[in-house]
Amino acid sequence: MNRELTYSILAYDEYFGIHDNGTVYVHTVMDAELLPPQLDVTIQATDQGIPALSASATLKIQVNDLNDMAPVFNQAAPTLHVAENETVGKCM
């Protein structure tokens, strides 16, 4: 009975889940712009002995930001006309 472990997530369980074998997975979409730079996800393993014994470990997870706000143009291919004698360095 002491060999049977149950796993739980003690922090950030709104983003992560844990399988019966202890494998951690992401179960929702995360936006890096709304999260702290590092998530300290604490995992606890508890046996079924009497008394029950437990241990914990902290996973330090960094969520990378993706370009989810790509630029949008009003027309399919924007057109810009530049005179051949335009001043070098001029902003258009």
Image: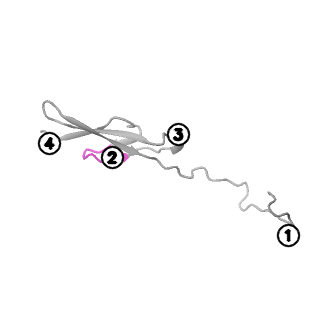
C-beta proximity under 8 Å, tags 1 and 4: no
Q: CA distance from mark 1 to mark 4?
A: 79 Å
Q: Earlier in the sequence, mark 4 or mark 3?
A: 4
Q: Amino acid at mark 2?
A: Val
Q: Residues within 10 Å of mark 2 (few under 14, many from 20)?
A: some
Residue 85 x, y percent position in the rendering:
87, 68
Amino acid marked by disc 1: Glu
Query: Which of the two labelled residues, at mark 3 and mark 1, occupies the earlier sequence position?
Result: 3
Q: Amino acid at mark 3?
A: Leu
Disc 4 from disc 2: Cα separation: 20 Å
- Regarding mark 2 in the picture, which secondary structure is present there? strand
Looking at this rendering, what residue extends furthest in the top direction?
Answer: 51
Residue 24 located left or right of residue 2: right
What residue would you read off at disc 3? 34
Q: Disc 4 vs disc 3: Cβ atoms closer than 8 Å?
A: no
Identify residue for label 1: 84
Question: What residue span does the magenta drawing correspond to?
Answer: 18-25
Badge nearest the viewer, 1 or 4: 1
